[in-house]
Amino acid sequence: MQNIPFLSLAAQHDLIRDELEQGFRKVIDGRRFILGEEVTSFEREFAAYCGVKYCVSVGNGFDALYISLKALGVGAGDEVIVPALTCAPTWMAVSMTGAMPVGVDVDARSFNINVNQIENAITKKTKAIVPVNLYGRPAALKEITAIAEARKIFIVEDNAQAQGAHLDGKKTGTFGNINATSFYPTKNLGALGDAGAITTNDTDLARKASALRNYGSSKRFANEEIGINSRLDELQASVLRIKLRHLDQWNHERNLLAARYRVGLENVSEISIPADPRNGRCVDHLFVICCMKRDQLRSYLGKQGVETDIHYPVPPHLQEAYIPLGHKMGSFPVTEKICNSILSLPLWPGMTLENVDYIVDSLQKFFTRKEL
Ligand SMILES: *Cc1c(COP(=O)(O)O)cnc(C)c1O
């Protein structure tokens, strides 16, 4: 029997251990620990990687979303469109500005926001749309851009799960007026703690975001507006600079593992897998399958030594925190059905094709074994 954890960063870290330790020493011996040279270098390098003019690093992905929305002037009385299938921070960043998150159901094939339902959700109060590139798979960003331009609303991409993905030759996280990403340790590009970033081509928005992360100050002891403290530290920036150099290779490994899963599961009719977008490249942040017997399958895999997870078992609109919005079961039927049937399988750089084959074998056994 193989024991396969849902996620392990050990292989990644072994590969770059010496570089990381060298980086730590440099920071220890340096003079600045917050917003210093490592941070400035990382911002320059990540902007170049994404193909945007500006990167403003922040403390985490939630703050990246919150500050992006604040930079656009989103606040009380505004509405912001968000996909129903996402994790809570996408909705909560909107709520924290004082605006209302307006959910839109996802597409049953792509699992990303259903562009045909966005128009219906737009009102006079709608200020922005926050598309999420879920599981490393680009949302229909071209169609969303067309809607946003026609209706004069902003786009803030939530690219927390898709660093390195692209659509029509353009990296995700660059389609919005201003875009947010997270470097939470489990993301495709992860720090050794909390970290996040904002990317934009808009000089004014970059300047605003940069002030908002530091008490609304762009000049020492001058506060132009009310801001928060969400600064990246030198240690995390040092880690991110090193890992950024490996991101394409690690994403490539993710693609190979996902392709192996796809081939292996092709003939398992009980399992369905979200469809890839045309003209796009996914970065397989998670490998998610749908199966009506999800809970039995999960416990069977557990007994075979295969650890799994669910992203997400309860969507934001059914969370206790969002009871005041008045949603109920049935508000977003596609999302709810997905949440009841999805299962995330192990997928991480360093995992082997033999691991995938073992998991595929176990899945096939589950469906062909005699019902007990
Ligand atoms: C991880 C994640 C966030 C939040 O990022 P943190 O760094 O944990 O605050 C937001 N949106 C999505 C889609 C995420 O996956």
Image (cartoon, rainbow, N blue to C red):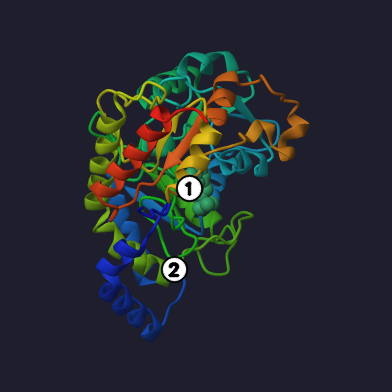
Q: Position of residue 367 (x, y in %)?
A: 41, 28
Q: Is residue 110 visible?
A: yes
Left or right side of 264 for 195: right
Pointer 1 local density, CA inside 10 Å: few below 14, some 14–19, many at least 20: few
Which sits in the foreground, 181 or 314? 314
Q: Measured from the top left, where is residue 141 in percent x and y? A: 38, 27
Q: Neighbour class for label 2 at 10 Å: few (<14), some, many (≥20)?
A: some
Number of numbered labels in the structure image? 2
Relative image position of residue 243 (x, y in whole percent) = 30, 61
Q: Nearer the viewer, mark 2 or mark 1?
A: 1
The disc at residue 35 is 2
Query: Label 1 CB, ligand 1: below 8 Å?
Result: no
Alpha-carbon distance for marks 2 and 1? 47 Å
Check disc 1 and report the residue beneath it: 303
Q: Is the residue 204 above or below the residue 280 in the image?
A: below
The tag earlier along the polypeptide, 2 or 1, is 2
Marks 2 and 1 in Cβ contact (< 8 Å): no
Q: Is residue 158 visible?
A: no
Q: What's the residue type where badge 2 is placed? A: Leu
Secondary structure under tag 2 reads loop
The residue positioned 45% from the left and 49% from the top of the image is: 307
Q: Is residue 85 left or right of residue 345?
A: right
Name the residue at 78% across, 32% down.
324
Q: Residue at x 26, y 41 (%)?
A: 255
